[in-house]
Amino acid sequence: MIFRRPFYASLIVAGLLSACATPQPEPTPVPPPPIPTPPEPPQAPPQQIPPPAPPAPPVALPPPPVPMAQLRSADWGGIPNWKQDNLLESWPAFLQTCAGLKSNASWQMVCNAAQNLNGPDEAGLRAFFEQNFQPYEVFNPDSTLEGTVTGYYEPLIKGDRVRTTKAPHPVYAAPDDLIVVDLSSVYPELKSLRLRGKLQGNKVVPYATRGEIESGNNGFKGKPIAWAEDPVDIFFLQIQGSGRIELPDGSHLRIGYADQNGHPYKSIGKLLVERRELKLEEASMQGIKAWAAANPDKLAELLQSNPSFVFFKELPNGLSGPLGALGVPLTAGRSIAIDPKYIPLGAPIFLSTTWPNSPQPLNRLMMAQDTGGAIRGAVRADFYWGFGPEAGEQAGKMKQKGRMWVFLPKGFVPPPVINAAK
């Protein structure tokens, strides 16, 4: 806070200084020598003052949606395999991005240009991106260029709409007492941060942890939307963020992310490695499921070591894919989850990595259409593989190194760096 001295205090000080001054006798005045009077300059004609110009209309230059502290301007020629990638495969995903960003002024111009392309071919799409976007290489706060690329998918699990002896494990909707506090209206730099809890008296306190939810403690009152046969399936369903439940009649119930309890995600695979119950190369989804089958007595404690808990909602079965954080269906092999603190949600991303458990290059244009509780960092991505067992096989074993380039519409000016706590 800046404190300013009141105006009346200045007058009082001036008065005191005047009152305390000792009067001195005035000296006898001495007449000064005469000063010649210079001739008056000729009078200039009266100046015509033009009327004030009307104010210029404000220029709306939308800022980028996130700080660009970890982005460095790049050249198209420096992006590996940019000329060889089949952009026709990524085009439907880009049009989905435009559908999700239709109310975002920053993207309207390029999305309008995309809509005006009539049956573009490979060369036309490459020209479109090069003419309308500026590529930026993403780097980490320590200036390194590589990060971790994992995979996720849309799983299919067995269950029912009602509780049965075969399907006794609840899949919960978001509870009525869960409060989500959005601070962005007061602190715009915290727009990617949400605080979750519940009211206790007149205070907001942390919401129940996974252990408290599963044991019914801490006053948790859940609203099941379905029931599953296997608790491990529910756990991995929460990690994936969406999935389908196969009902007894063979039909599918599609569900997607609704909310989360506000507690941080902790990796049970990492914990098993630290306990030396799994080797590092075994800490995949498949390896964890095998460990769970062999250690049923330890399973509940292991799952509850991750306090994060995800709630779901039912989705229409007619969607082409699960809904990501952008609110549009994900595209298998062309959508990724990113950390929105560093990467604008919806932006095209060129990802340079390798196939799961392989040195074979995997370089392609992706769309940043999703986020995830475990996806934290600048050079960090989660590759969406699609639906079903084959996609799950690829996703479960993917933990590769990779580099990323983000494409932003030309003319964007980087805003000030914002260091928002997550």
Image: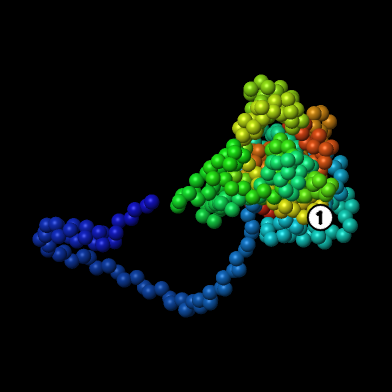
Task: Give the left or right position of residue 174, taking residue 108 as reference.
Answer: left
| Observer-nearest of 357 and 63 | 357
x, y percentage for residue 18?
17, 60
Could you say where residue 395 lies in the image, as x and y percent from the top left?
A: 78, 36
Q: Residues within 10 Å of mark 1 (few under 14, many from 20)?
A: few
Q: Residue 272: in sight, yes or no?
A: yes
Report the residue at 57% width, 50% height from top.
178
Q: Position of residue 238 (x, y in %)?
A: 69, 41
- The residue sitting at 80% across, 49% down in the picture is 252
Q: Determine whether, in the image, residue 119 is placed left or right of residue 9.
A: right
The picture places residue 273, in percent across and down from the top left corner, at 67, 24
In the rendered structure, which amino acid carries the disc numbered 1?
Gly
Quarter of the picture containing the C terminus is top right
From this viewpoint, which residue is outermost toward the front? 165
Residue 102 figure quarter: bottom right
Question: Is 44 located above or below residue 155 in the figure?
Answer: below
* Camera-side residue of 321 and 67: 321
Q: Quadrant of residue 292?
A: top right
Q: Is residue 308 visible?
A: no
Residue 157 as seen in the image, left or right of residue 143: right
Q: Residue at x 12, y 62 (%)?
A: 26
- Residue nearest the observer in this picture, 285 or 92: 285
- Tell me the residue that label 1 is attached to: 318
Query: Which element is circle 1 on?
Result: loop
At horizontal 25% and vertical 59% (from top left) the residue drawn is 9
Nearer to us in this view, 285 or 377: 285
